[in-house]
Image: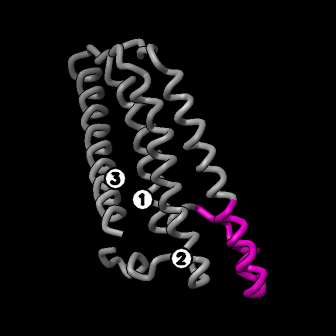
């Protein structure tokens, strides 16, 4: 579990850095466009790529905390056994989906090979790598939730629910 804690800390730090950079570049773009009347040519492209990374890395953090949007009005009214079954189906579907994202994300990133972005000439492999990296992190968190669900019937970590350090 120590390696998982390290991976989570690195991911948390990466999300913070990506959000900070995204905010900085957006502020710079607005300032350059409306104060100097000379927009930055590269900032919109970089922000688009940072958003992709933010979604994929942030998705793992949200999965860990059980914060993804769910419409549970129907499942909340089900008997305990039926609710358990629907939760199990949802977790298995999530596992399958992110295994596919991870697998095909690797292929997409590899196929990006020599492509570069138009404005900053960034190798697109850095952009497309968000798919397998984020897919793997979300898959890891989903596996942890799945195991916890099979053991306790609740995929949420009690320490996370209380806001404690995991």
- Identify residue for label 1: 61
Question: Dot 1 lies on which element?
Answer: helix
Q: CA distance from mark 2 to mark 1?
A: 17 Å
Q: Residues within 10 Å of mark 3 (few under 14, many from 20)?
A: some
**Magenta stretch?**
69-92
Q: Is residue 85 magenta?
A: yes
Q: Which mark is residue 137?
A: none
Dot 2 corresponds to which residue? 148
The mark closer to the camera, 2 or 1, is 2
Residue furthest left in the image? 36
Q: Which residue is mark 3?
A: 11
* Image location (x, y in percent) of residue 152: 57, 85
**Residue 22 point in image, percent of width and height:** 31, 37
Q: Is residue 6 left or right of residue 147?
A: left
Residue 166 versus residue 103 in the image, above or below: below
For the point 45% across and 38% down, the residue is 130
């Amino acid at each position: 579990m120590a390696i998982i804690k390290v991976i989570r800390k690195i991911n948390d730090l990466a999300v913070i850095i990506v959000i900070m950079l995204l905010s900085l570049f957006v502020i710079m773009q607005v300032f350059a466009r409306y104060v100097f009347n000379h927009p930055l040519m590269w900032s919109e492209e970089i922000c688009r790529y940072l958003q992709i990374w933010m979604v994929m890395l942030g998705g793992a953090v949200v999965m860990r905390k059980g914060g993804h949007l769910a419409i549970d009005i129907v499942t909340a009214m089900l008997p305990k056994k039926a609710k358990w079954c629907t939760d199990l189906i949802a977790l298995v579907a999530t596992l399958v989906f992110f295994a596919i994202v991870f697998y095909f994300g690797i292929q997409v990133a590899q196929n990006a090979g020599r492509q570069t972005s138009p404005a900053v000439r960034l190798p697109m492999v850095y952009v497309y790598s968000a798919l397998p990296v984020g897919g793997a992190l979300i898959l890891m968190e989903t596996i942890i939730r799945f195991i916890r669900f099979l053991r306790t019937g609740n995929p949420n970590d009690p320490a996370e629910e209380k806001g404690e350090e995991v």
